[in-house]
């Protein structure tokens, strides 16, 4: 146990040191990767642990983005308060819409969250204070290194939260809901309250990530803030790494970010294409994520890949 | 209020308020009466057998008591308080636990974790401390003979072990009222005797039990009283020997249709 | 009069939307697959008809059956050799894989066809017909009629043919259907192919009343969701009706509130419906 803690500590320190030794490009890739890892981890709380697959976390990302942007660009409040506003908006939305939407299950829940995100985007695009379709420009600022460290801090906080969940009574309740919600109800789990709590935690971290991103690129618009493809990317990263685990989403995020960046720097369209292909192949051959692939491979070698097909084919 | 053939309660018991009292419980599904004006009372510490042919409404009745289903009419009183508006988890906190006829384990969680959930969320909201909950879970795994499966995922358990797990999970909730829905289905003779012994032990710890069963010798040996449901209505209520030799009950099981 | 005109346009476009959603509803109802690449199939159908028209000079309505056949084959192969591999895993996986397919198809289209806007403009494109004092664009009317006809054909297929019976049986109970001799792999592939063919037809018609680019997929997928939820999975005509409802709502919204709100309204409606009809939504979860 202690070795693991030391190892993790070293990793964090190593990551924190990157801005001092790496070049600008690496730092920028780092910020992107760290923020995505946070998104994947936040999704993991609701999707991986509670079993409610959301395709609309971009709602919270967008609210976090716009909360920060409006606070800083229109109201001239400091960054911290801006982040706070974004978080409040997102968690408020989670509680308000969570209650009706969390009554849905499976596909219907996923679609409802998607629709929520699209609606929010469309609404914001019509608000003057949000700059309508043109968007807002935030005050230009300091070096990337600060954003990098902030993103790292956020990721550490999110991961620590997930680690706590994995070991707590709250987490057991979430897992029970995931495995069999009716049985969980009958055994005394207040499923509505727990689901809303999970959604709110998810919304919180997602919104803060959005806020940091907004200030970093100093520009927000409805399309970018509520980008629907963000949803699938964060889901894929969490799934690719291993949902319902503490480090799976991190692994998935870092690996897929690297893959995406490498591909994008060579040929842009082909990058997107290959990314899509990677997703298709991953779902076929490793539906339970990288961590499971790693342990499965150790046990059975290449047969693990075929086994997944055999289990899930018609 | 009670149906024909009801046994009048002995004087002493009348003085003590029932643990659970159902009055006129009714549940309809798409116009079909699944449970039709069923009334009964459960005394603290007794074992009540619930029998009836398939489709009689037994599992529906258990669903109404545990809160999984909402009654269309009627009332349910537990320890003197109305519970028919309470959600299932609130009833669990009051001390009502149940097993499911179609078993519902948490497939990817370990057997130990499955039982621990009951300890963490059961009576009065359950244990707050994970370690204490796990210890209680271990004790229950011992009690139900599942210790050697503790770390296995619940999805890997075979039929009889699955039934034991259902029981352990319900017991982990420290229920005052335990609703058992066909826990003996598919067990062989020796296993049935085992379960009967376990149920009697559970009653010995002060738990009131409602048992749905088709295995007649088990019901006969376990129950203080038996209620018979047929087409959703309470057909008969009384002592095991009287009930099990009642011609109407036998007719109901042999399928002679009521007019 | 303006209101009536706007409503008419809404209804006509709505019929087309309904056809578009039919393919998704069929696949969802029978295979329990929510196909996030559905819009991409519509897009491909649009390009099919476009190139048959612009490249070979075939009249678009005559090109429709050809495009449908091509899309049927494509859908069949896709289901048979890709989707059938993962169909028994969690619902999330079908969502993810169809998303991946959507990305692949969109960017393949971008590579092959460029991002240029394409419109299918037969010579009679601008013609109008006057009915009851309203100006009815001929093309839109023809598209509407084609949509309704195809929906009716689908209904006939499902209700009156052996294949249709097999499809309906499989939708209700795969195990029982198997016992009756249905080969699931084949049937699933046929159904998906059928859905793709319908999507392709919708794409061809869409190209006549609007433009085709590689990116129209996402919005059309989303719109098809909304319509499928409104219309339900039971009856093709319910879907067409759902499409018309959406068409009308969009028309009214653009008249009274402004075109930019139409998306918000469609999605807001979706959320409301999903939430207000939980009993129906919980089935099939």
Image (cartoon, coloured by chain):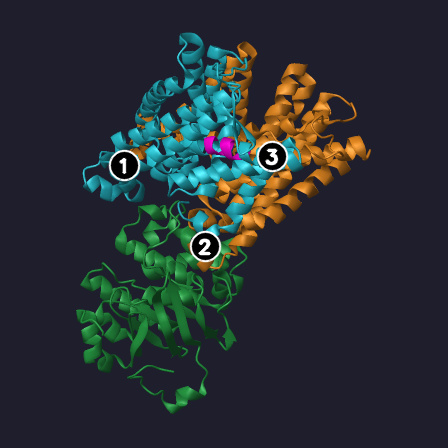
Q: Residue at x 42, y 45 (%)?
A: C285
Separation of marks 3 and 1 at Cα, in angstroms = 36 Å
Which chain comes out green in the rendered image?
B
How many residues crowd around disc 2 within 10 Å: few (fewer than 14), some, or many (20 or more)? many
Residue under label 2: A184
Q: Position of residue B38 (x, y in %)?
A: 37, 75
- Identify the element where label 2 is drawn: helix
Rendered image quadrant of residue C61: top left
Which chain comes out cyan in the rendered image?
C
Residue under label 3: C262
Q: Residue A223 colored magenta?
A: no
Residue under label 1: C164
How many residues crowd around disc 3 within 10 Å: few (fewer than 14), some, or many (20 or more)? many
Q: Along the horizontal axis of the image, is C248 left or right of A76? A: left
Q: Residue C13 colored magenta?
A: yes
Observer-nearest residue: A295 or A75? A75
Where C160 falls versus B124 (above or below)?
above
Whichever of labels 3 and 1 marks the residue nearer the N terminus, that label is 1
Q: Residue at x 32, y 51 (%)?
A: B148
Separation of marks 1 and 2 at Cα, in angstroms = 40 Å
Q: Along the horizontal axis of the image, is A146 left or right of C158? A: right
Query: Do the dots labelled 3 and 1 sit on one chain?
Result: yes
Where C284 falls versus C48 (above or below)?
below
Q: Position of residue A73 (x, y in %)?
A: 79, 30
Q: Along the horizontal axis of the image, is A279 left or right of B51? A: right
């Amino acid at each position: 146990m202690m070795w693991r803690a030391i190892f993790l500590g070293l990793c964090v320190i190593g990551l924190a040191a990157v801005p001092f030794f790496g070049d600008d490009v690496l730092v920028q890739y780092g910020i992107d990767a760290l923020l995505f890892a946070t998104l994947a981890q936040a999704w993991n709380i609701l999707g991986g642990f509670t079993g409610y697959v959301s395709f609309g976390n971009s709602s919270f990302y967008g609210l976090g983005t716009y909360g920060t942007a409006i606070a800083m660009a229109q109201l001239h409040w400091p960054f911290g308060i801006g982040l706070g506003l974004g978080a409040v908006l997102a968690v408020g939305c989670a509680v308000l819409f969570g209650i009706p939407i969390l009554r849905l299950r499976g596909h219907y829940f996923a679609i409802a969250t998607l629709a929520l995100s699209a609606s929010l985007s469309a609404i914001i695009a019509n608000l003057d204070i949000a700059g309508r379709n043109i968007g807002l420009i935030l005050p230009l600022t300091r070096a990337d290194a600060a954003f990098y460290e902030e993103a790292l801090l956020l990721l550490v906080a999110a991961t620590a939260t997930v680690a706590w969940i994995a070991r707590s009574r709250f987490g057991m309740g979430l897992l029970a809901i995931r495995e069999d919600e009716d049985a969980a109800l009958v055994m005394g789990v207040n499923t509505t309250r727990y689901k809303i709590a999970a959604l709110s935690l998810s919304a919180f971290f997602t919104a803060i990530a959005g806020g940091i991103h907004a200030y970093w690129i100093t520009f927000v618009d409805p399309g970018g803030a509520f980008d629907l493809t963000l949803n699938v990317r964060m889901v894929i990263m969490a799934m690719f790494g291993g949902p319902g685990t503490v480090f799976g989403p991190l692994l998935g995020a870092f690996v897929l970010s690297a893959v995406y960046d490498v591909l994008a720097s060579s040929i842009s369209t082909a990058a997107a294409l290959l990314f899509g292909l990677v997703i298709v192949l991953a779902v076929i051959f490793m539906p339970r994520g990288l961590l499971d692939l790693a342990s499965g491979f150790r046990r059975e070698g290449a047969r693990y890949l075929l086994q997944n097909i055999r289990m899930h084919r018609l | 209020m009670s149906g024909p053939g009801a046994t009048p309660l002995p004087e002493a018991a009348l003085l003590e308020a029932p643990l659970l009292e159902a009055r006129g419980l009714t549940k309809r599904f798409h116009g079909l009466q699944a449970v039709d004006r069923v009334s009964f009372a459960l005394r603290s510490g007794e074992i009540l057998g619930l029998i009836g042919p398939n489709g009689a409404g037994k599992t529906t009745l258990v669903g109404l008591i545990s809160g999984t289903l909402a009654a269309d009419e009627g009332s349910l009183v537990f320890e003197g308080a109305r519970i028919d508006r309470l959600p299932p988890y609130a009833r669990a906190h009051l001390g009502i636990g149940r097993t499911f006829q179609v078993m519902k384990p948490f497939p990817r969680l370990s057997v130990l974790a499955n039982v621990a959930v009951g300890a963490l969320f059961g009576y009065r909201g359950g244990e707050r401390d994970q370690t204490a909950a796990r210890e209680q879970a271990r004790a229950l795994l011992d009690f139900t003979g599942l210790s050697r499966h503790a770390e296995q995922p619940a999805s890997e358990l075979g039929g009889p072990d699955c039934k034991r797990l259902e029981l352990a999970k319900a017991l982990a909730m420290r229920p005052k009222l335990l609703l058992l829905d066909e826990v003996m289905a598919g067990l062989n003779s020796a296993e049935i005797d085992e379960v009967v012994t376990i149920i009697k032990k559970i009653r010995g710890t002060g738990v009131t039990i409602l048992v749905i069963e088709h295995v007649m010798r088990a019901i006969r040996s376990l129950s203080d009283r038996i209620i018979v449901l047929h087409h959703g209505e309470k057909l008969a209520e009384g002592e095991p020997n009287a009930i099990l030799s009642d011609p109407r009950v036998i007719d109901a099981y042999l399928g002679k249709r009521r007019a | 009069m303006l209101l009536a005109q706007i409503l008419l346009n809404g209804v006509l476009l709505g019929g087309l939307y309904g056809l578009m959603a039919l393919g998704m509803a069929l696949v969802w109802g029978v295979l329990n697959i929510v196909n996030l690449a559905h819009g991409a199939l519509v897009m491909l159908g649009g390009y099919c008809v476009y190139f048959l028209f612009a490249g070979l000079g075939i009249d678009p309505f005559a090109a429709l059956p050809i495009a449908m056949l091509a899309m049927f084959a494509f859908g069949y192969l896709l289901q048979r050799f890709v989707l059938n591999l993962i169909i028994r895993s969690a619902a999330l996986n079908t969502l993810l894989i169809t998303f991946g397919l959507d990305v692949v198809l969109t960017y393949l289209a971008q590579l092959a066809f460029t991002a240029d806007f394409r419109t299918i403009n037969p010579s009679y494109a601008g013609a109008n017909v006057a009915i009851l004092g309203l100006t009815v664009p001929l093309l839109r009317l023809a598209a509407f009629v084609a949509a309704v006809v195809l929906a009716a054909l689908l209904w006939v297929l499902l209700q009156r043919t052996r294949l249709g019976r097999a499809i309906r049986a499989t939708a209700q109970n795969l195990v029982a259907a198997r016992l009756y001799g249905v080969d699931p792999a084949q049937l699933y592939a046929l159904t998906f192919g059928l859905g793709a063919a319908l999507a392709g037809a919708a794409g061809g018609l869409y190209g006549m009343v609007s433009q085709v680019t590689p990116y129209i997929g996402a919005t059309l997928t989303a719109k098809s969701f909304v319509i499928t939820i409104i219309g339900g999975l039971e009856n093709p005509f319910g879907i067409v009706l759902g499409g018309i409802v959406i068409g009308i709502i969009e028309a009214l919204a653009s008249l009274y509130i402004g075109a930019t709100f139409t998306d918000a309204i469609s999605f807001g409606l979706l959320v409301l419906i999903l939430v207000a009809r939980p009993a129906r939504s919980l089935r099939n979860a």
